[in-house]
Amino acid sequence: MIFKDYYKILGLEDNKVTMEVIKQSYREQAKKYHPDVNVGNIASEERFKDINEAYQVLSNGVSKRKYDRMWNTHIGNKRKRQEYQESKRGKDAVFSDFFNMFFGNIKGEDKEETKDRKKPQIKGENIETEVPISIVEAFYGMNKKISLRTIDAKMKTFDIKVPAGIRDGEKIRLIGQGKAGQNGGKNGDLFIRIKIEKNSKFELMGYDLYTSLYLTPWEAALGVRVNLEGIDDTVSVYVPAGIESGEKLRIPGKGYKDGKGGRGDLTAIVKIVVPKKLTEQEKELYEKMKEISKFNPRAK
């Protein structure tokens, strides 16, 4: 009977290796010769069985010491390595004749464990989806229920906690809620990407919020103090005389949360609004201003 060099089967030079190295070599060889990767290749299938057999022996302290004594006699002392040869085993047998003669059933191992070792554990795929929320919801944070259709076409509801001040595009991770793992592997995760929707009142740019400040022509000309509604309170803003449409007024510390306990700024963009309909008195005043005013915005 041919002596099986389990160390060589796992791609190792000799038996002066740690258990961690043995495990790492096993994973590499098992991945390389796995039947799912080498479909229809009988030689690879037999090699895969030998790899599992080698790991079965070398990963167990008792059987490893017993094997090392034989290895030193057959291989180590001779300083010579035999070419790899497949073990002889019966049809559908897990272990070779060599293994059965010298080791039999290793203590602590059972048929179910041996069966599980045939295929490596594979983690399930992650799933990603997108959930839209408003700027106000993102600013304050919220608990939200979402319903998603699973791979088996069933609807499943998830409770998610959206933290206050979350950024556009940030993801919330739900561990183990992705696709199922294989061969005992862990499930994948579910990633929920937050999409902050555009708002008619506020626009988010970085940590700053932008809003419109509407003024009448006379407010813009004479100057005025107005109340401006922010995302979480109302602030008093002084508008200087002669301000024009498009000019900006910055209110520090009234913008979006920066994630460090601070806030960005709130910027008010001035928009001067002209009345669509005038009373007779208003029309007279505009006509009079037209006569007496020397202001010409088109003059160079």
Image: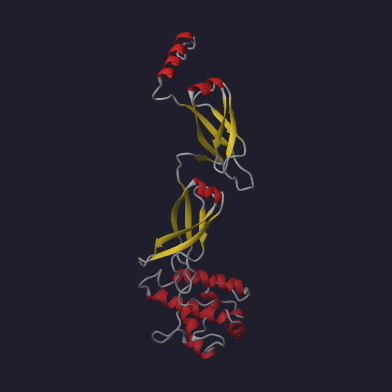
Q: Is residue 55 visible?
A: yes
Nearer-the-camera pick, 163 or 212: 212
- Write the residue at 59% across / 71% down: 21
Q: Position of residue 221 (x, y in %)?
A: 53, 20
| Colouring chosen for the image of the structure | secondary structure
- Write the residue at 60% across / 72% down: 20
Q: Eyeballing the image, is 299 above or below 260? A: above
Quadrant of residue 267 in the image? Answer: top right
Q: Position of residue 286 (x, y in %)?
A: 44, 16
Count up the numbered dots.
0
- Write the residue at 38% across / 86% down: 91
Q: Is residue 5 visible?
A: no
Nearer-the-camera pick, 218 or 181: 218
Nearer-the-camera pick, 124 or 247: 247
Nearer-the-camera pick, 5 or 176: 176
Q: Position of residue 9 (x, y in %)?
A: 51, 75
Quadrant of residue 251 in the image? Answer: top right
Q: Eyeballing the image, is 214 above or below 28? A: above
Q: Eyeballing the image, is 169 above or below 185? A: above
Q: Position of residue 5 (x, y in %)?
A: 53, 79
